[in-house]
Image: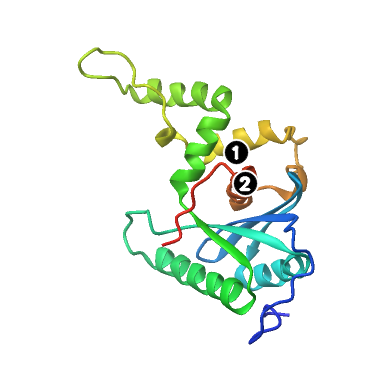
Amino acid sequence: LGRIYPFGKKLYIRNMYHDFFIGVDPGNEKCGMTVLQRGCIIGAWNLEHPNFYRKISYFLTLGCKIAIEDLKPYSVRLTPQVIDTAKFIGECVYRLRIDCGATVEMVNRSAVKKWVFDTFPEICVPLIMKKIAKKGQRIASTGEFRRPSFVYVDDKIIVEAMKFHYKIPKPPPGNGYMYGLKEHSWQALALASLYYSGCHKFVTK
């Protein structure tokens, strides 16, 4: 069960219409995975890498499209965590795309941020303006606060946008969010939502 089956052969996809859209937010030890079907959330998980392969194997047999956040656009120090994340992404893409014949797209983080900003301005703009005001970021020539843009979108803003989009209420004290959403799976939800919306340009080279 620790491997995607069958290895060495193309996986037979029964559903050619790809009803399932899966977002994957990779990490060095765990990754977030969220699944949409016809625009509705089916489930969300934060999984260690071996458990991720077990979970996604089920959806591969049903027919799905997979969006994975790409690491290439980042300019970061090569820490052990970054190297392990890059290794996982490479292994994941190879196993899903080459061994299983799945449809896999690599999505830049900036594409997700821009989509969230453009699609949910009523959520993003007020939160970004608070960030700009708190940091005192003003235009030197006029003294006015900088204009909000997608570059200010962070993980917290993405979470708020997803709550708004899917009408996810705040959970009671001591309980988690619906569908098991937490940590990396919120970002995976944004990836799957972007993919489903069709409002994107993927960077795959």
Q: Amino acid at mark 2?
A: Trp
Query: Quadrant where the C terminus lies?
Result: bottom left
Residue located at (41% from left, 29% from top):
149
Residue located at (76% from left, 47% from top):
38
Mark found first going from the N terminus, 1 or 2: 1
Disc assigned to residue 44: none
Q: Residue furthest front?
A: 16
Q: Amino acid at mark 1?
A: Val
Name the foreground residue: 85 vs 72: 72
Name the foreground residue: 91 vs 102: 102
Residue 82 position in % (x across, y down)? 41, 63
Q: Which residue is mark 2?
A: 186
Residue 151 relative to residue 4: left or right = left
Residue density around tag 1, few if under 14, some if 14–19, many if 20 or more, within 10 Å:
many
Name the foreground residue: 89 vs 178: 89
Quick one: SS at disc 2? helix
Task: Tell me whether the residue at label 1 lies in contact with that at label 2, contact meaning CB atoms closer than 8 angstroms.
Answer: yes
Query: Quadrant where the N terminus lies?
Result: bottom right
Quarter where residue 92 is shown: bottom right
Residue density around tag 2, few if under 14, some if 14–19, many if 20 or more, within 10 Å:
many
Q: Which residue is mark 1?
A: 159
